[in-house]
Image (spheres, rainbow, N blue to C red):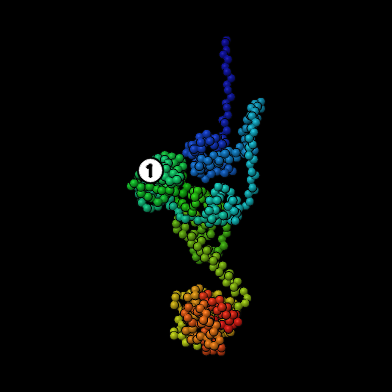
C-alpha cells in the first residue's frame, strides 16, 4: 500500500503584540519625515493621534497643535521626540520580547552594525513635590514648557492665579438652533455635518473654509489663521459650532467660532455653558479650558472656606469652592451670577477687614494731641456767620470736635457736594485748635484754591494786613516780590473774641519768591503763625 508523504502541519503563529503608542508615534514620525512634514502621515492629521494617546504619551513634550507648527518647527519637534522615544526604549525590554526569547532560545538575533551616533541621555525627572497654591507655573505638571510663556503673558504665574483665571464669557450650548433659524448678529449654536473643507489664502497665515449643513440648510464657517483645521475637519465630521452669526453673500456664516467635534453621541459641553477665556497669540481655547480644569482639580482641595456659615446664609451666598467651580463651569447663568456675587462680596469683605485693621493700628498708635475746644468761643464764632449750620453740618462738626478731643489721632474724610459747607467745618476745627494754643493748616491741591481759602478766612475772621515792620516783609521795589496773585499780603491777623492774642493767618504758595517763603517758614516754625 502506497502512502503519500503529508507535510507537517504548521504551528499556528501567535498574533503579533499590539504596538505601544510610543512605537506607533516613532513610525508615524518616520513616515512624516519621508513626506516632508506635511501632516499627511495620519488620516485627519497627526493631532488626532496625539489627542487620542495623550495619556500614554504624557512623558513626552507634545505640541498644542502639530498642524499649527511650521514645517521647520515640526521637523525639530519630531527629531527631539524620536530621540526621547529611543532613549526610553533602551531602558526597558518589552515583556513580549522576553517571552519570545524564552520560546526560541536557539534563535540568535542578527548583529547590527555598530552605530557611531550617540543617543541622547534622558534628563532625570525632578521629584514631584506636593502642589500648593503658590506652586510656580514651571512646576505644574499639566503646563508644558511651550505653554508657559503664553500663560505668563496673560498674567498667570502660579496655581492660584490659574484657578482665578475666570472666563470672559460663556457660550450657551444648551440652546441649539437649526441653520434655518439663525439670526444675523446673534450668538447662536448649531449642530452640523461638514460637507466640504478647504484652505484659502486669506491674510498672512491663511484660513480654513468649511461648508456644513443640518437637515434645514447650509452654513459657511471660516477660521482665519488656522488653515490646518481644513485637514482635521474632513467631510462627514459632526460639529457643534457656536458664535456670532454673520452674513456673507446672503448666506449665514460663522467666523472663528468655538467648535467641538461630536464623537458618536458624546458631546462634552452639550447642554452646558462653554467657558471662553482671555487669550493671547498662539493660545487656543481648548488649551485654556484643559489647563483651567486641571487647575481646579488640583487647587480647589487646597482652599478652605474663611467666611462663617451665618454670614453666608444671611447674605444668601454660595460657598467658596462652589463659587470658584461655578465661575468656570456654571449650569445656568443664574448660578454664574450668584458665584460672581460671592466673589465680589469677598473682595469688599477683605477690603473692609484691611481698613478696620489699619484703623485699629492707627488708634493704638501713641502721640495724639487732645484738643478740648472752648464751645462758647466756637458758638459765638458761628453766630457771626450769615447763615446757620444745617443738621448735617452740625452733626459733622460735632463728630470732628469729638474726635480731636481724644488722644487718638483723627482720621476722617468729610464728603459733600460743592458749596455744601465743608470749608466752614474745617475752619471751625482750626479755630478750636488755635484756641487751645496749637497751630493748624489748611492744605489745597492748587494755588488758585489755596488763595480762595485764604480770602475766605480773611472774610470769616474779618482779618487785616499786618502793619509796621511785618509789612516790610515784601519789598515793593523788588519786582519778584509781588505777593499773592490777588495783590494782598501773605500774612493777615484777626481779633477773635475769646482768644487773647491776635490770630495770624498766612498764605504759603509756590509762586512766592524764595526770600518770602523762607521768612514765612521761619514764622511758622517759631509759632508766630496760627493758621
Task: Classify 10 Å Cα crowding around label 1: few (below 14), some (14-19), many (20 and above).
Answer: many
Give the number of callouts: 1
Residue 414 x/y as whole percent: 50, 75
Name the element at disc 1: strand
- Residue 466, given in percent of the width and then of the height, sits at 53, 86
> Vertically, is 447 above or below 236?
below
> Which residue is at 49% across, 73% downward?
446
Which residue is painted at 49% across and 50% down in the image?
A: 281
Horizontally, residue 125 falls left or right of residue 225, namely right
Can you name the residue that lies furthest to the top here?
Answer: 1
Name the residue beneath numbered marker 1: 213
Spot the residue most to the left.
250
Q: Residue at x 51, y 75 (%)?
A: 511
Quadrant where the N terminus sits is top right
Question: Which residue is more in the foreground, 135 or 425?
Answer: 425
Residue 425 higher or lower than 90, as above or below: below
Q: Is residue 21 visible?
A: no
The C terminus sits in image quarter:
bottom right
Residue 350, given in percent of the width and then of the height, sits at 55, 65
Q: Nearer the viewer, residue 246 or 114?
A: 114
Q: Residue furthest front?
A: 477
Location of residue 335 with respect to 258 vertically, above or below = below
In the rendered structure, the answer to whether residue 216 lies left or right of residue 259 reads left
Residue 407: where, in percent of width, then height? 60, 79
Residue at the (54%, 88%) spot, across then down: 468
Figure quadrant of residue 156: bottom right
* Front one among 474 and 242: 474
Along the line of sight, which residue is nearer the eye, 522 or 112? Answer: 522
Res 482 seen here: yes
Q: Is residue 316 above or below residue 12?
A: below
Amino acid at each position: 500500500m502506497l502512502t503519500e508523504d503529508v507535510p507537517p502541519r504548521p504551528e499556528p503563529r501567535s498574533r503579533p503584540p499590539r504596538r505601544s503608542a510610543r512605537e506607533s508615534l516613532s513610525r508615524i514620525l518616520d513616515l512624516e519625515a519621508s513626506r516632508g512634514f506635511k501632516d499627511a502621515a495620519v488620516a485627519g492629521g497627526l493631532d488626532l493621534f496625539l489627542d487620542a494617546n495623550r495619556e500614554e504619551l504624557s512623558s513626552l513634550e507634545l505640541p498644542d497643535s502639530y498642524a499649527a507648527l511650521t514645517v521647520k518647527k515640526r521637523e525639530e519637534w519630531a527629531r527631539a521626540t524620536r530621540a526621547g522615544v529611543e532613549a526610553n526604549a533602551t531602558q526597558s525590554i518589552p515583556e513580549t520580547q522576553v517571552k519570545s526569547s524564552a520560546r526560541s532560545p536557539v534563535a540568535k538575533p542578527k548583529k547590527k552594525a555598530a552605530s557611531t551616533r550617540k543617543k541622547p541621555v534622558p534628563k532625570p525627572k525632578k521629584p514631584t513635590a506636593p502642589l500648593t497654591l503658590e506652586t510656580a507655573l514651571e512646576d505644574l505638571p499639566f503646563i508644558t514648557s511651550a505653554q508657559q510663556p503664553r500663560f505668563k503673558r496673560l498674567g498667570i504665574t502660579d496655581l492660584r492665579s490659574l484657578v482665578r483665571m475666570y472666563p470672559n464669557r460663556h457660550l450657551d450650548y444648551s440652546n441649539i438652533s437649526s441653520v434655518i433659524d439663525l439670526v444675523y448678529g446673534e450668538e447662536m449654536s448649531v449642530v452640523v455635518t461638514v460637507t466640504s473643507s478647504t484652505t484659502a489664502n486669506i491674510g498672512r497665515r491663511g484660513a480654513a473654509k468649511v461648508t456644513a449643513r443640518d437637515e434645514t440648510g447650509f452654513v459657511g464657517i471660516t477660521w482665519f489663521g488656522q488653515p490646518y483645521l481644513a485637514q482635521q475637519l474632513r467631510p462627514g465630521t459632526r460639529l457643534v459650532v457656536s458664535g456670532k452669526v454673520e452674513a456673507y453673500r446672503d448666506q449665514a456664516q460663522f467666523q472663528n467660532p468655538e467648535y467641538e467635534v461630536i464623537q458618536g453621541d458624546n458631546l462634552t459641553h452639550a447642554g452646558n455653558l462653554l467657558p471662553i477665556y482671555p487669550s493671547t497669540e498662539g493660545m487656543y481655547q481648548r488649551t485654556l479650558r484643559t489647563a483651567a480644569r486641571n487647575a481646579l482639580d488640583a487647587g480647589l482641595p487646597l482652599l478652605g472656606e474663611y467666611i462663617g456659615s451665618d454670614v453666608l446664609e444671611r447674605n444668601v451666598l454660595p460657598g467658596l469652592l462652589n463659587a470658584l467651580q461655578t465661575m468656570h463651569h456654571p449650569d445656568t447663568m443664574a448660578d454664574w451670577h450668584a458665584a460672581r456675587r460671592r466673589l465680589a462680596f469677598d473682595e469688599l469683605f477683605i477690603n473692609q477687614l484691611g481698613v478696620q485693621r489699619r484703623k485699629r493700628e492707627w488708634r493704638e498708635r501713641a502721640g495724639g494731641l487732645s484738643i478740648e475746644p472752648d464751645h462758647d468761643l466756637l458758638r459765638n464764632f458761628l453766630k457771626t456767620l450769615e447763615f446757620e449750620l444745617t443738621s448735617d453740618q452740625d452733626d459733622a462738626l460735632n463728630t470732628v470736635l469729638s474726635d480731636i478731643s481724644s488722644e487718638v489721632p483723627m482720621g476722617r474724610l468729610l464728603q459733600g457736594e460743592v458749596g455744601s459747607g465743608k470749608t466752614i467745618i474745617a475752619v471751625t476745627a482750626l479755630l478750636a485748635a488755635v484756641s487751645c494754643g496749637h497751630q493748624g493748616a489748611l492744605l489745597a491741591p492748587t494755588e488758585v484754591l489755596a488763595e480762595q481759602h485764604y480770602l475766605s478766612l480773611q472774610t470769616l475772621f474779618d482779618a487785616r494786613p499786618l502793619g509796621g515792620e511785618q509789612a516790610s516783609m515784601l519789598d515793593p521795589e523788588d519786582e519778584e516780590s509781588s505777593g499773592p496773585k490777588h495783590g494782598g499780603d501773605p500774612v493777615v491777623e484777626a481779633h477773635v473774641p475769646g482768644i487773647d492774642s491776635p490770630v495770624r493767618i498766612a498764605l504759603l504758595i509756590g509762586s512766592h519768591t524764595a526770600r518770602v517763603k523762607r521768612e514765612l517758614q521761619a514764622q511758622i516754625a517759631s509759632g508766630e503763625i496760627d493758621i
